[in-house]
Amino acid sequence: MKLKRSKLTHKQTDELLKLFVAGSTARGAGDVVDVNRNTAINFFRRIRERIAVHQEQELSFYGEVEVDESYFGGRRKGKRGRGAAGKIPVFGILKRNGKVFTCTIKNAKKETLIPIIKKKVLPDSIVYSDTFRSYDSLNVEGYHHVRINHSKQFAKHKFNHINGIENFWNQAKRHLRRFNGIPKETFYLYLKECEWRFNGGNNRDLLISLRKIMSEC
């Protein structure tokens, strides 16, 4: 594949795409392919920018969905989770046995989260969340709202959980740890990369997807 406005050869481009899918850092990929590190860094950023645009085109969700917020950033002393200092708040919506949608948010207030849910989740869906008060109005917004209380044993019904979205957060944090810190200004691109990886299947499918995304540049 030879990309427009790129000085990389067909072979270099294809090798960099493969290394990106494999989870390599840009610097490591540049060393392997024998291209300037800044060239590899800029190319990987271009890949993430294209992935982010692609992911924003995903369809809305319907049926059983899980919603949750999470907080990303380096380990710090003090409060963890909601309200933790220095963390980047993010929000996710996951279709049970399906895809995930993520976005960065300024805060986890009702006024921030409910509009996102209404934009991405079709009415009459079953929405699973924890007991955070920002979700309290989901029943009157046209959804069937099921609250999961983590402080109590919830073996009451095997489907009463938000394990899917929590599993995604864990996967995303494991992937991002290899980059040893991500600037806030580019974090969104890495988050959408994690979303794309989760939704895209195995590495072979991801490579096919990535080649198609980049061919549209």
Image (tube, rainbow, N blue to C red):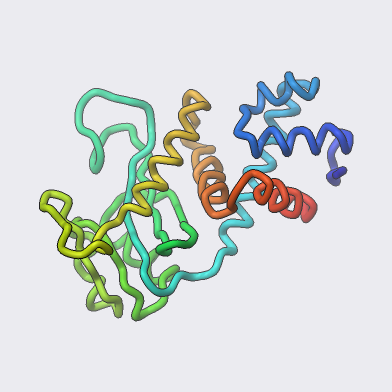
Side of 103 where 48 appears, left or right = right
Residue 155 percent across, percent down from the top left: 17, 58
Residue 14 percent across, percent down from the top left: 80, 38
Residue at image coords 54%, 38%:
186
Residue at image coords 31%, 68%:
127
Side of 7 where 212 appears, left or right = left
Q: Nearer the viewer, residue 100 or 4?
A: 100
Image quarter in which the N terminus is found: top right
> Quadrant of the rendered structure where residue 174 is?
top left
Side of 164 where 209 appears, left or right = right
Side of 119 where 79 appears, left or right = left
> Quadrant of the rendered structure where residue 34 is?
top right
Residue 70 percent across, percent down from the top left: 33, 45
Residue 104 vertical position relative to residue 101 in the rendered view, above or below:
above
Residue 101 vertical position relative to residue 33 in the rendered view, above or below:
below
Q: Nearer the viewer, residue 126 or 136?
A: 126
Residue at image coords 56%, 47%:
197
Residue 101 percent across, percent down from the top left: 47, 57
How many numbered marks does the figure carry?
0
Residue at image coords 34%, 48%:
166
